[in-house]
Image (cartoon, rainbow, N blue to C red):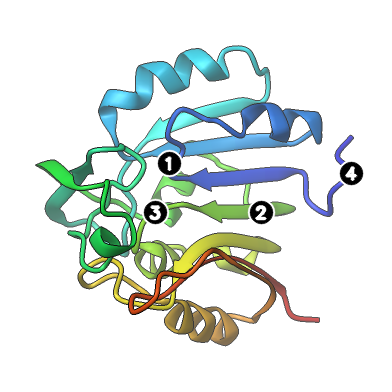
Amino acid sequence: MTDLPFSHVIHIGADWGQEASSYAAHGLSVTWIEAREAVMPRLTEHLSHFSDQRAFHATLSDGVQDRAFYIASNGQSSSIYPMALHALRFPEVSMVDQHQCTTTTLDALVAEHGIQTTDTALVMDVQGAELDVLKGASEALRHVCYIKAEAADFNSYEGGAQLAEIDDYLKAKGFERFVLAECEPTEGVGNYYEVGYRRAR
């Protein structure tokens, strides 16, 4: 039995599922979604040790689109957007490759695979694509109770969302921000935050 106010997590931007043990310790079932096909074997193998966690390979956005996906040197900073000031914030990270992909929406994935959205927290680690994912999740947002994301207050990715835009969009969808944890800022660039939202009472 979970000790949290939700029983399921949809984690978008899985990488290899580093948080799987923590989720399991809280009794949570988890649906992982990862855009990079190359990391899927490692993710699938890792999740084989957890009975209530599964993964899907998909690149999420606000619709079905053919677009570039940019691969970062550290893997985790990969995105549907090219880097802007992220390269100043993390000069050791660069985009080293790109490929074409066809995006889909969270709502379409939920419908196709019967993914749980009630009693669910949505976790996004999607490198500037947060607003795109949310716009493609209008049905899911009617049901999820918590949302966690990493967001920047500067132009981290070219064309990507910033914190204020995410705040405004989720407020209009009936959510309130209740967590804002500041990461170490970079002078002249800006800051990243761990941000949490819950359905407004």
Q: Residue visible at 42% across and 32% down?
A: 56
Foreground residue, 13 or 111? 13
* SS label for mark 2: strand
Q: Foreground mark, 4 or 1? A: 4
| Amino acid identity at mark 1 | Glu
Foreground residue, 21 or 59? 21
| Amino acid identity at mark 2 | Ala
Disc 1 crowd, CA 10 A, few/some/many (<14, 14-19, 20+): few
Residue 135 position within the rendered picture, expressed as x and y whole percent measured from the top left: 40, 70
Q: Quadrant of residue 155?
A: bottom left
Marks 3 & 2, CB-CB < 8 Å contact: no
Residue under numbered circle 4 = 3
Residue 50 position within the rendered picture, expressed as x and y whole percent measured from the top left: 66, 18
| Amino acid identity at mark 4 | Asp
Marks 3 & 4, CB-CB < 8 Å contact: no
Marks 1 & 2, CB-CB < 8 Å contact: no
The residues tagged by marks 1 and 2 sit, at their Cα atoms, a distance apart of 19 Å
Residue under numbered circle 3 = 126
Earlier sequence position, callout 3 versus callout 2? 2
